[in-house]
Image: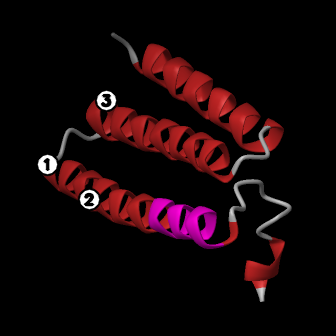
Amino acid sequence: MTLQTVLLVAAALFSVGLYGALSQQVVVMVMMGLELMLNGLILAAAGFWWFLAPDPSGQVLLLVIIVAMTVEMAMGFAVATHLHRVRRADMTDMAADLSG
């Protein structure tokens, strides 16, 4: 596997996530699209670190980023679940008043 292959897969993941985040109106589906976009970025960063400078410190940094992303997405899903339970709002335009 070459760097070009890894970057191609990362670009495909990012593109599918971007399409999913922009085309959906359900909050959970938008969050899944964002998750795919972040996974594409992490894969690209891991590919660069693996092929250009195989240093373990880059892998540790990626693990920290993955843990932070997991906590962020868990909190986002908790907010989306609470929003659905309290207001029966699952669409992004129904949750617009949370922006303030």
For numbered disc 2, what is the local secondary structure? helix
Mark 3 or 1 closer to N-term?
3
Q: CA distance from mark 3 to mark 1?
A: 12 Å
Q: Which residues are magenta?
A: 77-86
Q: 97 above or below 39? A: below
The percent position of residue 53, horizontal first and vertical second, equals 27, 41
Above or below, 17 against 60 in this view is above
Which amino acid type is shown beneath numbered disc 1?
Answer: Pro
Which residue is nearer to you in this view: 41 or 96? 96
In the image, which is nearer the foreground, mark 1 or mark 2?
A: 2
Q: Which residue is mark 1?
A: 56
Give whichever of 62, 24 is nearer the camera.
24
State whether the magenta stretch is mostly helix, strand or loop.
Answer: helix
Look at discs 3 and 2 and give the one toward the viewer.
2
Q: Amino acid at mark 3?
A: Phe
Residue for point 56% across, 28% down: 13
Disc 1 and disc 2: Cα gap in Å?
9 Å
User: Which residue is the site of mark 3?
Assistant: 51
Residue 21 is covered by the magenta coloring: no
Tell me the number on the disc at residue 61.
2
Q: How many marks?
A: 3
